[in-house]
Each structure stands twice: as C-alpha cells, then as structure tokens.
Amino acid sequence: RMKLWLDTDPGVDDALALALILARPEFELLGVSTVFGNASVEQTTANALRLLTLFGRPELPVHAGAARPLVGEPRFAAAVHGNDGMSGCTAQLPEPAGAAHPVSAVEALLAASHAHAGALHLVAVGPFTNLALALRQDPSLPQRVASLTLMGAAFGGHGYTGNVTPCAEANVHNDPRAAAEVLAAPWARCRVIGLDATQRTRIPIHRLAPLAEGNATQRLLWAASQPYAGYYATRDGENALVAHDATAVAALLAPEAFTWRTGPIRVVEGGLAHGQTVQDWQHLASATDSEWQGLPPHAVATDTDAETLTLLCLQA
Ligand code: BDR
Ligand code: CA
C-alpha cells in the first residue's frame, strides 16, 4: 500500500479527494496537514477534523499549517466553497472527535518523511505554503519522498489558463512564491495535475444523485456538491462537480488515464499574470536561459480520460 500524506484546504473537492483516499485499498493515509485557501486555516482544520470523524477515521492526525502565503495576504474562496469552505454544510457534519494535533504541519510532514523515508507519497491539493516552509527548513526533504502529486497550475490545455484570474489557478495564485519554491526542488517524481486535466473531470450532478440515498459520507458529498456545482454552472454552463483535488488522487491510482508532458516549470509573480505557470516542455529556454537552468523537469497532466476519472471519483 502507498503511504500517503495529504496537505489540503477543505474544500468541497478536497472532501471528495479525502473520501477517495480512504475508500481505496491502495492507500494508507498517515496524516493530514491543513493550509489556508478555500477558507481560513482555522476553518479548513476544523473541516478536516469533522470530515475524518464523519468518514469513520477520527484517529488520523490533523496538523494545522500556514494561515497565510509566504508573500502577501490570504484570500479565501467563499464564492466557490461557501463561507465555511463546505458549501454551508458544516452543520451537517459531526462535531470533531478530537482537536488538531499539537505538532505543526511542517514538523509533522518532515517527521513522516524520516519515519517513512523513500516510501512516502505526498499529495498537496491546497496552496503549497506548508511544502515550501518544509523545504526551507529541510532542503533534503525531496530525497526522502517517493512521489509528490500537486493539484494546481494551468497551462492552457483545452483553453484552461486560470480559474481565479484569466492567467492563474487558485492554489498557485494563493501563494505563487511557495509554488515556485516547490517546483524548483529536486523531487524524484513530481506530477502536476492542473486545470488542463481537472476541468475535464466534471461529474454531471445527475450522476451524483444516487448519493442522496447513500450512507452519511455520500449524503454529505451530495449536499456539499449542490452549491459547488451551481457555482460552476453559472461560470461554465454545466451543472457538474468539477473534481479538481480527487483528480490528483486519481493520478496516483491510474497515471495511464492521463496524458503527460515533461519539462521545468516557472511561476509568474506580480502584474497581470500573477500566479501564471509556464512549462518549457519543448526545452526552448532551459538550455540557454539562466533563469531556467537547473530547474528540474516535472510531469504535467495535459489531458485525462474523463470517463475513467469520473468512475474513479464516484468510488469515493
Ligand atoms: C483548487 O482550488 C481550490 O478551490 C480547490 O479545492 C482546488 O484545490 C482548484 O483550482
Ligand atoms: Ca483544495
């Protein structure tokens, strides 16, 4: 089984990603760290605790992480995920069985990388601030990580260049400096699942309808999906759950269901394109331009087999 660490900002699609991880026998979830993003870190931490209680895994530790980006002020996504980060459904969630673990996200992540050196798979589906802080504290972290899977970024595939601005995806836009530092680190295997792929994993709301009659987890996912899909309906014209974060989890289960392109990635900071990600997959600049030299190549998902992904996500 793959030993997993989830860094997250729940988040409706984060909740689906967590449910998918817990539902799959391929994974052993060791711990969860939280970060600001869809809501404040206090809120996302409380949401992670409530979700784990609902999902029957209250013993799993939740470690609170960064409340703000490395640079600038935090922004939250109430329009997409509600003021509570859970589409206003926190009242339907149980009270958490326990409190957040006293060890911070960065310390816990680093400790897990030592305890499971070479076997730890990191999955980050919020702003990458905790990862960047962990790297600043211990630049040797990548040597102990089997793989890193990031949900974030956008490279223009299928026209998807951004979702908070025309140029930027939310997790990168929330902390471009952290994204740049994480993408500059020498991970043995780093997969970037951006909007090019995740916007394709759109589960039409009618396919989720059976969840309304399901168990407590399924009923919560159904209830939280309604306003979230409604937001995307007004924007994209289709009433569907866009399963960004679960798509990243699915990349660990079924990498063959994605099309990949490899090359180094840089992040724009400031100005019109703040938070934009650029991949030099044609190696146009990497050989000659000093700004690109030394940046490690990463695998970017440029497309998905949307039906395979939908079926996987429905197993959550
Ligand atoms: C990402 O931003 C958040 O709103 C979602 O949870 C996802 O991680 C999509 O851009
Ligand atoms: Ca998220």
Image: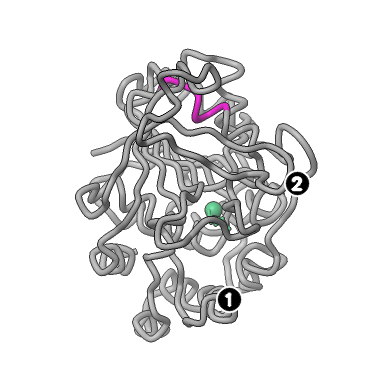
Binning the other alpha carbons within 10 Å of mark 1 as few (below 14), some (14 to 19) or many (20 upward) gives: few
Binning the other alpha carbons within 10 Å of mark 2 as few (below 14), some (14 to 19) or many (20 upward) gives: some
Residue nearest the observer in this picture, 280 or 45: 280
Q: Position of residue 287 (x, y in %)?
A: 40, 19
Instruction: Specify the amino acid type for callout 2.
Output: Pro
- Image: magenta residue range: 181-186
Asked whether, in this view, residue 143 is left or right of residue 229, the answer is left
Q: Position of residue 195 (x, y in %)?
A: 46, 56
Per the rendering, the mark at residue 101 is none
Are discs 2 and 1 less than 8 Å apart at CB? no
Asked whether, in this view, residue 96 is left or right of residue 252, the answer is right
Can you say whether 117 is above or below 84 in the image? above
Q: Is residue 161 visible?
A: yes
What residue is rendered at 66% in x and 73% in y?
Answer: 88
Per the rendering, the mark at residue 235 is 1
Instruction: Determine which residue is flagged by label 2.
Output: 74
- Is 138 magenta? The answer is no
